[in-house]
Image: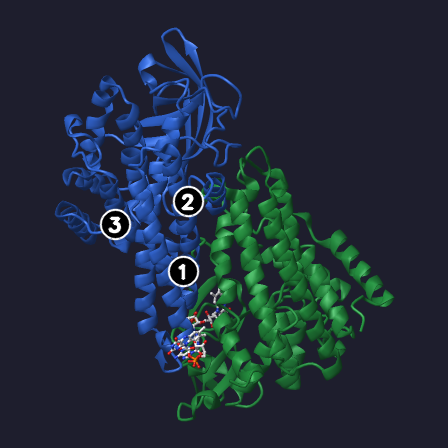
Chain colours: A green, B blue
Amino acid sequence: MDLSLTPEEQAFREEVRAFFRDNVPAGIKKKLSENRHTTKEDMVEWTRILHKKGWAVPHWPKEYGGTDWTAVQQYIFNEELQATPAPPPLPFGVNMVGPVIYTFANEAQKKHYLPRIANLTDWWCQGFSEPGSGSDLASLKTKAERKGDKYIVNGQKTWTTLAQHADWIFCLVRTDPAAKKQQGISFLLIDMKSKGITVRPIVTIDGGREVNEVFFDDVEVPAENLVGEENKGWDYAKFLLGNERTNIARVGMSKERLRRLRELASSTQAGGRPIIEDPKFREKLAAVEVELKALELTQMRVVANEGKNGKGKPDPASSVLKIKGSEIQQTLTELMLEVAGPFASPYDIHGDDNTNETMDWIAQIAPTYFNYRKVSIYGGSNEIQRNIISKAVLGL
Amino acid sequence: MDFDLSEEQRLLKDSVDGLLNDSYDFEQRKKYGAEKTGWSKTVWDKLAEQGLLGLPFAEADGGFGAGAVETMIVMQAFGRALVLEPYLPTVVIAGGFLRHAGSAAQKAAHIPGIIDGSKTFAFAQLEKNSRYDLNDVSTTAKKKGDGWVIDGEKFVVLNGEAADTLVVTARTKGGQTDRDGIGVFLVPRNAKGVTVKGYPTQDGMRAADITFTGVEVGTDAALGDPANGLPLIERVVDEARTALCAEAVGAMDESLKITVEYIKTRKQFGVPIGSFQSLQHRAADMFVFTEQARSMALLATMASDFDDAKERAASVAAAKVQVGKSLKFVGQQSIQLHGGIGMTMEASIGHYFKRLSIIESTFGDTDYHLRRASEAGGII
Ligand SMILES: Cc1cc2nc3c(=O)[nH]c(=O)nc-3n(C[C@H](O)[C@H](O)[C@H](O)COP(=O)(O)OP(=O)(O)OC[C@H]3O[C@@H](n4cnc5c(N)ncnc54)[C@H](O)[C@@H]3O)c2cc1C
Ligand SMILES: Cc1cc2nc3c(=O)[nH]c(=O)nc-3n(C[C@H](O)[C@H](O)[C@H](O)COP(=O)(O)OP(=O)(O)OC[C@H]3O[C@@H](n4cnc5c(N)ncnc54)[C@H](O)[C@@H]3O)c2cc1C
């Protein structure tokens, strides 16, 4: 048993760290540390930088532009990226549909889509959830009827993150209405420019625009856009959802938030001294640090296991990572809110691309606190994760 | 011991609830919030018509001589409807200063305008470094001839743009955190040297940062003793905290109601999600938290009549602690139980969560009041 990184792993970490330090554009880094939204252009710029280095899709197989890094190296890469902070690659392409395509799609599809995902030529969004199908995803109703060499798609997706930027959407659609729930579902790739698609924004409680409703009204989709076999889409979806486990804990991101929190607490006064000197506040910081350290070690255990057992098998331990990771992220936003205190209240009328002269750093704190309630809702809510643990791990 | 409302208080409750039922649903609230002031003059006039703006003032001053319980009734109802109108700064805070410390002339000059709805007020207290400490005041008021000259900066002043008159805390002598030497001044918002920069707040209201540069006011601007106003400020702010506790209880009641309604109707896996025991228990805990908050909001309400300032302060601090803990749980879980819908601007539940969150950090957050309660030697 050895908790430390090998000298090679340490050297790798230094290399990755130095690359992020020197290559993340300063403007983007500032936005991230202030919890502002990055623009589409920011994401493209950053992805191209990574791509040039050969690191845009490191966890993909080498033949599709990936690397042969070990699970530990992948882990280090993600942690360092988040801790910098650098923008995480757009997950919908890189972590979701990409792996589905290289695992289940045909050669023509691989050849066409994968390179365009890797350098963000195509912006993908995820069309799984529907108004009536959230936690119970398999109840989805959007249907695709086969007509000759086309599918005709009708229905509605919702909560579609950043669909306003998207060139493509991957959807779960019902192709066999007679089959039972999970069985009649297919995995379809749809061009967002298709006739009959309408994107309508949903404004979130923080005033942001990150999610949308997407409506399909007799949308014609070439049959060749089907991934794998018809009516096997649920298997691919399960693979996709189970694939995210190394990222989900966001340990690196929380470390970065913690650093930022310390900074803010050092520069904000309460009762005639910086908040960071308040013993009660320091104890709260220490308490999150303990949780975060525990999570980091739990995550490393999962990563080490993955190294042994091979990729792709969903590990119920990922539910632990999701629950604790989201709770820690939320706790950190609460502590930030505490530090901002009465100054959290003004709404940042200047928006993302401007700065508020007086209290630059403070404007995003309450919105982030509000917005981060989402992390225990999406990606399988924390209640669903607990159901998974009690069933799959505890046998209840 | 009697926790029941009197006949008159019940009538008051029915009349506020009735008014808000008729004119304050979520869609109407959106419209009011979009007005330039951030609230509706029409609603304000209705509050005046029903006598709500005159509740706490003495009959001799044209009011109804009502007490803290009446204010609690009104604020709870306001919390349920997320009322945006400036009742807290005008009636509770400015009204409180005038009632406790106003001279006959000051009362005569200002109270009638509050009662008939023609004037609103704002409380300019928070400073860049003061945070929650009421004795931390850098804004100065210097004697000049018969009057005063005020200089300084105040932040996040609720209703600061729309108010006719600002109630300003300013130091007449001593160092930044001395307990002595703080005065309270009435300053017309349009006085020369007053610069107001307004903005929307996270909870859908409007506030302002206000700069005072050589603002000259008369002797009659000082409320109470300009050399020793802190006890007065503490008393009025405790009343404001008490009112906020009541508002929070109203907002929690409504959050719980909306959430329970939602989980009864939202179906997943073929059943209402309210049939899952994990959600039932969460809702039950929300209920427990709300009831604990209600009890402490009552204590704070009763405490405003305590003669012993220390006991009063400790009770209010304790109430703010419990309410702070409760509102966090209730606010967060309301969103969680709604799932994605709870994250949207379109659903009302998120607006309750936001208002509750901001109440937590208004006039002292949970930790601040925990310290106050502990420094008071406990409250049991
Ligand atoms: C900001 C944000 C971004 C998103 N982005 C995307 C996206 O890009 N693409 C996409 O497809 N989807 C996306 N989603 C949707 C997300 O996956 C769903 O919100 C999530 O699955 C929950 O579904 P729901 O919102 O319908 O809530 P519901 O499923 O209705 O859940 C409501 C509440 O009931 C609880 N609950 C449900 N079932 C059970 C049960 N069996 N036992 C106990 N409790 C239960 C839930 O935990 C929750 O607390 C996003 C959501 C958000 C908030
Ligand atoms: C110190 C002590 C003194 C006692 N004194 C007396 C006495 O004087 N006279 C007497 O008659 N009894 C007495 N009891 C017994 C006591 O009332 C029982 O322990 C109690 O009713 C719980 O029953 P149980 O121990 O069989 O646990 P169980 O009922 O088996 O419960 C085990 C666990 O399951 C949970 N659980 C059970 N049903 C549900 C449900 N529907 N939903 C969710 N969770 C559930 C429980 O909350 C508990 O956590 C005493 C017990 C203790 C510990």
The yes-or-no answer for disc 1 within 8 Å of ligand 1 is no
Residue A202 place in picture, x, y as percent: 42, 61
Q: Give whichever of discs 2 and 3 has the lower sequence position.
A: 3
The residue positioned 35% from the left and 22% from the top of the image is: B187
Residue A345 place in picture, x, y as percent: 45, 43
Name which residue type carries label 2.
Ile
Name which residue type carries label 3.
Ala
Mark 1 = which residue?
B344
Secondary structure under tag 3 reads helix
Mark 2 = which residue?
B379
Badge 1 vs badge 2, beta-carbon distance below 8 Å: no
Q: CA distance from mark 1 to mark 2?
A: 40 Å
Name the quarter showing ligand 2: bottom left
Q: In this picture, is A57 found above or below A279?
A: below
User: On the same chain: label 2 and label 3?
Assistant: yes
Quarter-wise, where is residue A292 in the image? bottom right
The residue positioned 58% from the left and 38% from the top of the image is: A268
Quarter-wise, where is residue B50 in the image? top left
Secondary structure under tag 1 reads loop
Q: Is residue A288 left or right of residue A6?
A: left
Please state which of residues A80 and B15 is positioned toward the viewer in this rendering.
Answer: B15
Secondary structure under tag 2 reads loop
Q: In this picture, is B266 found above or below A48?
A: below
Name which residue type carries label 1.
Thr
Q: Is residue B306 shown to the viewer in this render?
A: yes
Mark 3 = which residue?
B77
Q: Nearer the viewer, mark 2 or mark 3?
A: 2
